[in-house]
Image (cartoon, helix red, strand yellow):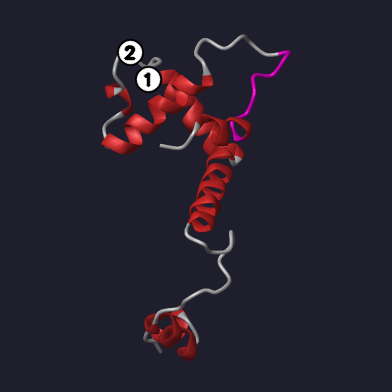
Amino acid sequence: MPNGTVLEPLIPRVKPSGRPENYPRRELLNGMRYVLHIGCFWRSVPHDLPEWRSVYYYFCLWKKDGTWQRIYDRLRGDLRESMGRFCQASAGILDSQSVKTTEKGGFEDTMQKRK
């Protein structure tokens, strides 16, 4: 489990002019992690975590504003560094099917044309 100090700067803060928060950000994140780990419905969030509506609302909000992508990028980079690699990948791989499709000209050229 990632240390809270790693993720804390990536989680958006409460806006000073907005409503006060009902739940700590850490507890909301715990609720999201529960659903994603277990694979259950949002309504199945245990009662010792924040209300499921709040957890789902912040999950969607953070997905839309790019918070989840920043968390993923940071954790992926940290993992790569811990394995002795560079933070960013230096190469990409294409499988043979992708290459075959591109040689023919893509989707339109692989489909049979009607006369």
Q: Is residue 14 magenta?
A: yes
Q: How far across and how far down the image is residue 71, in percent?
A: 54, 42
User: Relative to 109, is 86 above or below?
Assistant: above
User: Relative to 54, is 109 above or below?
Assistant: below
Crowd band around label 2 with a 10 angstrom C-alpha radius: few (<14), some (14–19), many (20+): few
Q: Is residue 55 magenta?
A: no
Crowd band around label 1 with a 10 angstrom C-alpha radius: few (<14), some (14–19), many (20+): many
Q: Quadrant of the C terminus?
A: bottom left
User: Relative to 8, is 21 above or below?
Assistant: above
Residue stretch rendered in magenta on the structure: 10-17
Q: Main secondary structure of the magenta part?
A: loop
Relative to the observer, which residue lies in front, 5 or 33? 5
The amino acid type of the residue labelled 1 equals: Trp
Quick one: SS at disc 2?
loop
Residue at screen point 50% across, 52% down? 76
Residue at screen point 59% across, 42% down? 66
Mark whose residue sits in front, 1 or 2:
2
Q: How far across and how far down the image is residue 83, in percent?
A: 47, 59
- Which numbered dot is residue 48? 2
Q: How far across and how far down the image is residue 89, in percent?
A: 55, 66
Residue at screen point 56% across, 31% down? 5
Is 18 displayed left or right of 37 in the figure?
right
Q: How far across and how far down the image is residue 37, in percent?
A: 31, 37
Using the rendered view, name the quadrant where residue 30 is placed. top left
The amino acid type of the residue labelled 2 equals: Asp
Quick one: SS at disc 1?
helix
Relative to the observer, which residue lies in front, 10 or 102? 10
Q: Determine the CA span between mark 1 and mark 2.
A: 11 Å
Using the rendered view, name the quadrant where residue 1 is placed. top left
Residue at screen point 37% across, 86% down? 112
User: Relative to 87, is 92 above or below?
Assistant: below
Q: Which residue is mark 1?
A: 52
